[in-house]
């Protein structure tokens, strides 16, 4: 297999040679921002939306992305092409760059950009058929007025702590509540419930990342005639829901079969969840920024 190429601060380098300074504040302090993006059949899905979120995260932490959006878009596409990837996961990282051991970012002279693209197949079909076991955890979601979940920063400890709790509890994913006990999101995915044919997802101001898959699902739900409300709900609402599902770049749309030991409805993926997954998989092949126009008409493998 040919080696993997990584874009690192202005050039493509081989994976083995893609190294950054231990003085980089991304490493020392989690000072930086990132995005996770999917490529389906040579189409980068929702690239404009991902770049918007990346630049907004950077703006919020006063981090200068070393390229403009058009340049970064081309770098991302070129990274996919150079690695000859048809279906892939892309990680874009902008870190504050190397400074001294103090946390003051003014000593970091040059922000760093890293773009990694790796082959990625869909998750196993069985996972979508079985549904995930989810557990609510003791750790609360960062309060938006303390560290906004909209900043997709390299500081993911809040999420890692809840993932650790989920692992300890023997469940597939965590459900994070905010400081008032309202459901916010999973460790790396947004949450939806369905009750009496209405779809609900928490408003992001409660403390959830405004997921790009979440927004695509809201659009698809509206286009397909479902009633969808962004409104707060509690764990009780989740336990008695007709359907529960999670959304995210990696998981797409995935059913939840159990929450805190309570089986959701009959414990099988629900009708609306399955319908939205089907519509989402159609969308990802139709809608995207092409890396390889000749792959446009190929189905997702
Ligand atoms: N919430 C969190 C905390 C996440 O890290 C992610 C993954 N980016 C999501 C939700 C889902 O967002 P998206 O659909 O943009 O991948």
Image (cartoon, helix red, strand yellow):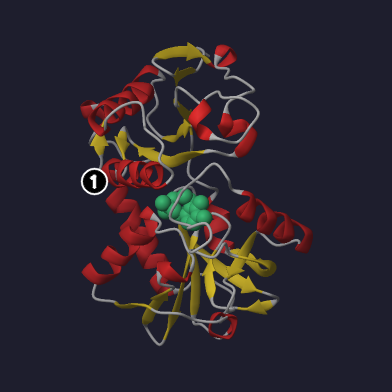
Left or right side of 44 for 208: right
Q: Nearer the viewer, residue 246 or 180?
A: 180
Residue 234 visible in the current orientation? yes
Local packing at callout 1 (Cα closer than 10 Å; few below 14, some 14-19, many 20+) is some
In the rendered image, residue 157, in percent from the top left (x then y), is placed at: 64, 50
Residue at image coords 28%, 31% = 73
Q: Count the marks.
A: 1
Above or below, 278 against 45 in this view is below
Q: Nearer the viewer, residue 112 or 145?
A: 145
Q: Nearer the viewer, residue 79 or 87?
A: 79
Left or right side of 30 for 297: left
Above or below, 180 against 5 in this view is below
Residue that badge 1 annotates? 286
Q: Quadrant of residue 18?
A: top right
In the rendered image, residue 79, in percent from the top left (x then y), is placed at: 38, 22
Dot 1: element = helix
Residue 248 visible in the current orientation? no
Q: Nearer the viewer, residue 211 or 288?
A: 211
Residue at image coords 69%, 68% = 137
Above or below, 291 against 44 in this view is above
In the rendered image, residue 245, in percent from the top left (x then y), is placed at: 49, 67
Q: Quadrant of the C terminus?
A: top left
Residue at image coords 59%, 63% = 130
């Amino acid at each position: 297999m040919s080696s993997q190429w990584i874009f690192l601060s202005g050039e493509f380098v081989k994976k083995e040679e893609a190294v950054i300074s231990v003085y980089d504040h991304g490493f020392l302090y989690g000072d930086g921002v990132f995005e996770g993006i999917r490529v389906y059949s040579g189409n980068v899905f929702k690239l404009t939306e991902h770049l918007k979120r990346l630049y907004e995260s950077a703006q919020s932490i006063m981090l200068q992305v070393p390229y403009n959006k058009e340049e970064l878009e081309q770098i991302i596409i070129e990274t996919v092409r150079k690695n000859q990837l048809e279906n892939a996961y892309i990680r874009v990282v902008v870190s504050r760059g190397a400074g001294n051991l103090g946390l003051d970012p003014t000593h970091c002279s040059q922000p760093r950009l890293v773009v990694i693209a790796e082959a990625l197949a869909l998750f196993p079909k069985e996972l979508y058929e079985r549904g995930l076991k989810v557990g609510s955890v003791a750790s609360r979601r960062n309060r938006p007025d303390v560290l906004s979940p909209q900043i997709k920063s390299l500081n993911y400890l809040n999420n890692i702590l809840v993932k650790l709790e989920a692992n300890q509890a023997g469940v597939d994913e965590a459900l994070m509540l905010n400081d008032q006990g309202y459901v916010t999101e999973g460790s790396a995915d947004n949450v939806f419930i369905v009750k009496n044919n209405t779809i609900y997802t928490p408003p992001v101001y409660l403390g959830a990342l405004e997921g790009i898959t979440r927004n695509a699902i809201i659009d698809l739900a509206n286009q397909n005639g479902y009633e969808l409300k962004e409104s707060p709900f509690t764990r009780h609402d989740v336990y008695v829901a007709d359907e529960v599902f999670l959304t995210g770049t990696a998981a797409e749309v995935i059913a939840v079969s159990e929450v805190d030991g309570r089986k959701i409805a009959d414990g099988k993926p629900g009708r609306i969840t399955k319908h939205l997954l089907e519509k989402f998989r159609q969308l990802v092949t139709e809608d995207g920024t092409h890396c390889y126009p000749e792959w446009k008409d190929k189905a997702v493998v």
